[in-house]
Image: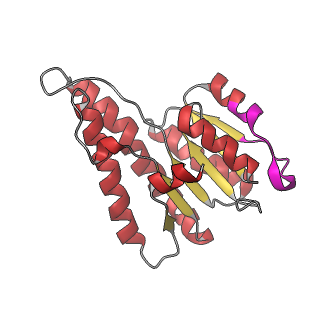
Amino acid sequence: MNTLAGKIAIIKGASSGIGAATAIKFSQLGATLCITGRNADNLKSVAEKCSYGSGNTVPPLIVQGDLTNDTDTRGVVDATIQRFGRLDVLVNNAGILELGDIENTSMEQYDRLMDTNIRSMYQLTMLATPHLINTKGNIVNVSSVNGIRAFPGVLAYCVSKAAVDQFTRCVVLDMHGRGLNYLPHHKFLQSL
């Protein structure tokens, strides 16, 4: 049974890696997709790889943009609602990793990591939440073991992923009883 048949999903960070694999798998399970990322060519390639299960013949909506830009982030949700009329699933996956410890991580590097890994997630979730409440939807925030375990040489990355984990816990508490569901990222990845 295709558990995502008829569902509308935004996959953030779908131009490579986990996000691309998620988009392909979701489409195989029947979901209609909005895929977003920075690299337009990669997004087109991912869209071509998506198969349409459950008779779904709707090609993915591609919204290329930089989700550290507020206008681009709003555009993802707006385009999804305009095209499909609702939203059932948000997968917050986009992230970057840069090397550096306390002695050699610049504030520019720190800001870049925090803007990409947590701020964009915060804003996209904030914009998507009213739509997800309406559909009793689901949110998956992909994090990293680096959020709960310290690793040398990736200080700002570890801090950003710890923020993702805490953000997720806080939103779960805020949304308790409102019909919005969160799936821990490790369970989500095991299901792929």
On the image, the x and y values in percent for residue 122 come to: 40, 50
* Quadrant of res 107: top left
Give whichever of 118, 74 is nearer the camera.
Answer: 118
Q: Residue furthest bottom?
A: 177
Tell me if residue 157 is in the magenta stretch: no
* Quadrant of res 113: top left
Q: Residue furthest left?
A: 103
Residue in the picture at 25% in, 41% down: 159
* Quadrant of res 150: top left
Left or right: residue 87 compared with residue 105: right
On the image, the x and y values in percent for residue 135 come to: 62, 69
* Count of numbered tags: 0
Give whichever of 18, 126 is nearer the camera.
Answer: 18
Give whichever of 9, 49 is nearer the camera.
Answer: 49
Q: Magenta segment, which residues?
A: 46-60
Residue in the picture at 45% in, 58% down: 184
Residue in the picture at 52% in, 38% down: 72
The quadrant of the rendering that contains the N terminus is bottom right
On the image, the x and y values in percent for residue 81 come to: 66, 55
Left or right: residue 181 compared with residue 80: left
Is residue 95 shown above or below 90? above
Is residue 60 shown above or below 86? above
On the image, the x and y values in percent for residue 158 come to: 27, 38
Q: Residue furthest front?
A: 190
Is residue 105 shown above or below 144? above
Q: How is the image coloured?
A: secondary structure
Tell me if residue 54 is in the magenta stretch: yes
Residue in the picture at 37% in, 70% down: 174
